[in-house]
Image (cartoon, grey):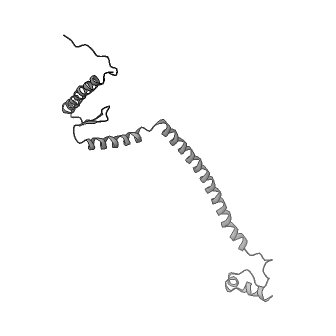
Amino acid sequence: MARKKIPIKKIDNINARQVTFSKRRKGLFKKAQELSTLCDAEIALIVFSTTSKLFEYASSSMQQILERRDRHSGIQGLVNPSIGQQEKIIQEINHLKTKEAKLMEENQKLKQSFVREQRQPYESFTCSSSEFPPDCGNSDTSLKLGLVYTLSYNS
């Protein structure tokens, strides 16, 4: 004779609920142990009763399994970031591209300014015949000896 199927809903009778919890918990732990043995799977099972009593089963070290889960969760978070994180990353990329464009433009302006400044000293230091007395000349020798300056101070 077949057993009557029990509807899955909360059991109102507290004693019957406790008995069902105990039996099903044992069955659940047995299934976890069988799965671990048959499939060589690492299993960690944690159950809290309504009275907050802890029941646990681990095919190997519970701590090692939990650490492995934490590492796996961290890797999954890196591999498959949420949509919000993807949008945030895209915004950051766009911001950095804009910043790069501004910096490239500023760099170009600085290069142009540098080139202009490199040309100016040669233009400002070139001697014209009207600046110096005609007897002094624009020779390198007179500049090296400081004759131009001495003549300026004597006058």
Residue at the image point whose x is 57% and y is 46% from the top: 95
Taking the image as shown, residue 95 lies to the left or right of residue 155, namely left
Taking the image as shown, residue 108 lies to the left or right of residue 139, namely left
Name the quadrant of the C terminus: bottom right
Residue 89 pos. (x, y %): 50, 42
Residue 54 pos. (x, y %): 28, 37
Q: Residue furthest top?
A: 1
Residue at the image point whose x is 76% and y is 84% from the top: 136
Name the residue nearer the viewer: 96 or 9: 9
Name the residue nearer the viewer: 16 or 32: 16
Residue 98 pos. (x, y %): 59, 47
The count of marks equals 0
Name the residue nearer the viewer: 111 or 36: 36
Q: Is residue 104 above or below residue 20?
A: below
Residue 122 pos. (x, y %): 69, 70
Residue at the image point whose x is 69% and y is 82% from the top: 143
Q: Is residue 153 above or below residue 76?
A: below
Q: Is residue 152 above or below residue 43?
A: below
Name the quadrant of the N terminus: top left
Q: Residue furthest bottom?
A: 154
Q: Is residue 106 above or below residue 8?
A: below
Name the residue nearer the viewer: 65 or 83: 65
Residue 118 image-quadrant placement: bottom right
Residue 15 image-quadrant placement: top left
